[in-house]
Image: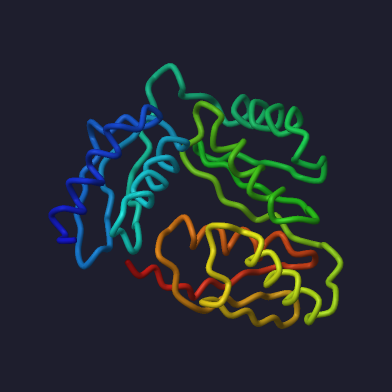
Amino acid sequence: MSDNEIQQNVESELVYDPKVDSSAVAVSTHDGDVTLRGTVGSFRQKLEAKKAAERVCGVKGVDSQLQVRLLGDYSKEAAELRGAVLNALTLNTFVPSTVDANVTDSTVTLTGTVDWQYQRDEAEWVAGSVPGVTDVFDEIELVGVRPDAGDVRHAIKDAFKRDAKLAADTLSVSTYDGTVTLDGTVNSWAEHDAAIDAAWAAPGVTNVEGRILVDY
């Protein structure tokens, strides 16, 4: 698939996605790598635009350089915005009470501790969905108990085999001191993300290094 075809398909996907206002988004492509430039109305839209681009067949990577430009009604003082973010985090049952948030110039910094990566992901997603937030920095620390490295590797490989989207034989797993490294080749970003998610779901994992190549 040519870069021009990929670019047109990404542009069409952005228009098709009702969660994204693509009117001020420019798409460029080079050797399958897509760059998004322009402005969107919220941090959530910025995340959704990147996900939409990654769904397109032929896309090898996405560099989102989108800027968030808030409408006047969504501009808030730091204290008010922090209160809204903390309230949203409190209402979400996946986010533990050990997570805190601070706000500077509409940018949220998340701190505290959690046991699982999905809790960090959920906190970032919730904070980024609050109207008025333009960016989120995740500084939450993972403090889960680290099991034996062999057990972690075995658990991840088993998870690969259970996932219908993944060809387990094309991926290798190595672990050291809580860090999991994934190597290999997959056929889509959906497979790439499924492999990363499976690694993060293993108990005691504190970091995942994805060296997975998306090869169509």
Q: The N terminus is located in which quarter? A: bottom left
Q: How many marks?
A: 0
Query: Residue at the spot x=35%, y=62% of the render?
Result: 61
Query: Residue at the spot x=81%, y=76% of the render?
Result: 151
Q: Is residue 22 left or right of residue 90?
A: left
Q: The C terminus is located in which quarter? A: bottom left
Farthest residue to the top: give it: 73
106 or 8, nearer to the observer: 8
Q: Say above or below: 170 vs 39.
A: below
> For residue 81, what is the image quadrant?
top right
Percent coordinates x, y for residue 110 in the rendering: 66, 47
Q: Is residue 119 left or right of residue 5?
A: right
Percent coordinates x, y for residue 116 in the rendering: 76, 55
Q: Say above or below: 166 vs 96.
A: below
Percent coordinates x, y for residue 83 in the rendering: 68, 27
> For residue 67, what is the image quadrant?
top left
Percent coordinates x, y for residue 124 in the rendering: 61, 44
Query: Residue at the spot x=81%, y=62% of the render?
Result: 143
Q: Say above or below: 136 vs 16.
A: below
162 or 40, nearer to the observer: 162
94 or 88, nearer to the observer: 94
Q: Is residue 179 left or right of residue 39?
A: right
